[in-house]
Image: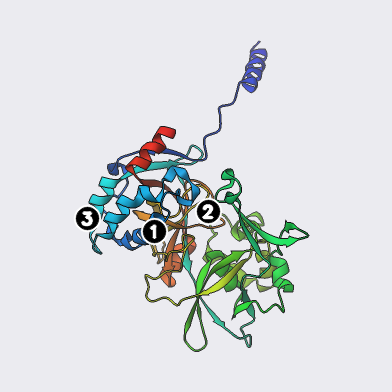
Amino acid sequence: MRILAAVLLAGLAACAPKPPPAPPLAFRPVTFADLPGYAADRVAEALPALSRSCTRMVARGTAALDGLERYGTGQDWQPFCTALNALKPGDDAGLRRLVERELQPVAVIGDGKPEGLFTGYYEPMVRGSRQRGGTYTVPLYRQPADLVQVDLGEFRDALKGQRIAGRVRDGRLKPYEDRTAIETGALAGKNLELVWLDDAADAFFLQVQGSGLVQMPDGKQMRVGFAAQNGHGYVAVGKVMIERGLLSREEVSMQSIRAWLRANPSAASELLRQNPSYVFFRELPAPKDDSDGPPGAQGVALLPGRSLAVDRGLHAMGLPLWLAATRPSAQPPYDDLPLQRLMVAQDTGGAIRGAVRGDVFWGHGPEAESIAGRMKHPGKIWLLLPRNVAARLMAQS
């Protein structure tokens, strides 16, 4: 009887309707007192990032930010941005008063979970030359003229934030060459070489980061930035290495991957080509100082430690937000340190997918590389929205 009852109960459980899946994006209003570390942050350090983004957002006028109506229009952000421009650099108290008066914090929940993954990226320094010769044999390519980039959100609202790329053949958009084809000569002879590097691994990681500084033989620096991508999906090499047993999940970092590539040069090319995604570059103005980062997806200069890359299909560029996570120290033993601060969504990336997912920009130099390469920590985010926008958002939720 017990066996029969167990079978009947199992059958009833299997027939019972399953609960609906949690939404990919949900919000919950909170107070500023709920933001971890809010009282301790030097919020005025984020002023340059906020100001740069405000200029772009206000210019939207009556249009929704990035076509995402839930985050309001340029006009909705006008009062906050106008008052922001009146603040002086370093005015922590003034910025706090403004933020608390004009904005409402809302917790972000993705797939029913308030916690997600936060990583880091930086602007690498590599060695290169405008002419091929000697050790400079690895090209960074400009965007090919026949590469077509398509913003799918312009065709369907449900596809906002999604993009593809390819080549038009016989009136149809077809996939462009993948990494293997490009690295084995698909673009040779087309005069697309922007600069030649002396290390294939450096070229690969430069594509992962999306921008970088190239140290030239004459001592000058050349800044290169993202121009286009070949349209193929991004495959994390670290994940491939875990699957092959080359590194454990705990061991994987940019530093450990680079060390393996250097120790196994004969296998490096095959491993890197497991990622079919390929990035094309353009030359950018050289940096003026350490705070002058490369432009992100919003088109404004990134600010080290205050700019965050997010999923553009879910979050608009320019949104101020509060991040509560941890990050590794720059020096051994790489202990975890609190990372609780005001940030701005100013960039995106192929591996940044999900409502509670972010990539912190750390700038350039050895310290930035050390932190970014090891950062893969859990965290939470809260968006800071104009009060009228937050009220509408909560009414719709």
Residue 319 vertical position relative to residue 305 in the rendered view, above or below: above
Task: Work out which residue is located at the far right of the displayed protein and give it.
Answer: 170
Residue 338 shows in this picture: no
Q: How far is disc 3 from disc 2 in space, using C-alphas?
A: 33 Å
Q: Residues within 10 Å of mark 2 (few under 14, many from 20)?
A: some
Name the residue beneath numbered marker 3.
Answer: 94
Amino acid residing under circle 2: Ile
Tell me the amino acid under the disc marked 1: Ser
Residue 60 seen in the figure: yes
- Label 1: state its secondary structure: helix
Q: Amino acid under label 3?
A: Gly
Looking at the rendered image, the disc whose residue lies closer to the viewer, 1 or 2, is 1
Q: Give the residue displayed 32% in from the left and 55% down from the top.
A: 81
Distance from label 1 to label 2 (Cα)? 20 Å
The foreground one among 283 and 117 is: 283
Q: Position of residue 18 (x, y in %)?
A: 59, 26
Q: Are marks 1 and 2 in contact (CB under 8 Å)?
A: no
Residue tagged 1? 53
Q: Position of residue 29 (x, y in %)?
A: 36, 38
For the N terminus, the quadrant is: top right
Q: Identify which residue is drawn at 35% across, 58% down.
A: 50
Question: In front: mark 3 or mark 2?
Answer: 3
Which one is closest to the eye, mark 3 or mark 1? 1
Helix, strand or loop at disc 3? helix
* Disc 3 to disc 1, C-alpha distance: 19 Å
- Please identify the quarter of the rendering in which residue 7 is found: top right
Q: Earlier in the sequence, mark 3 or mark 2?
A: 3
Is 176 positioned to the left or the right of 63 in the image? right
Classify the position of the C terminus by image quarter. Answer: top left
Q: Which mark is residue 352?
A: 2
Q: Earlier in the sequence, mark 1 or mark 2?
A: 1
Residue 213 lies, in percent from the top left, at 49, 75
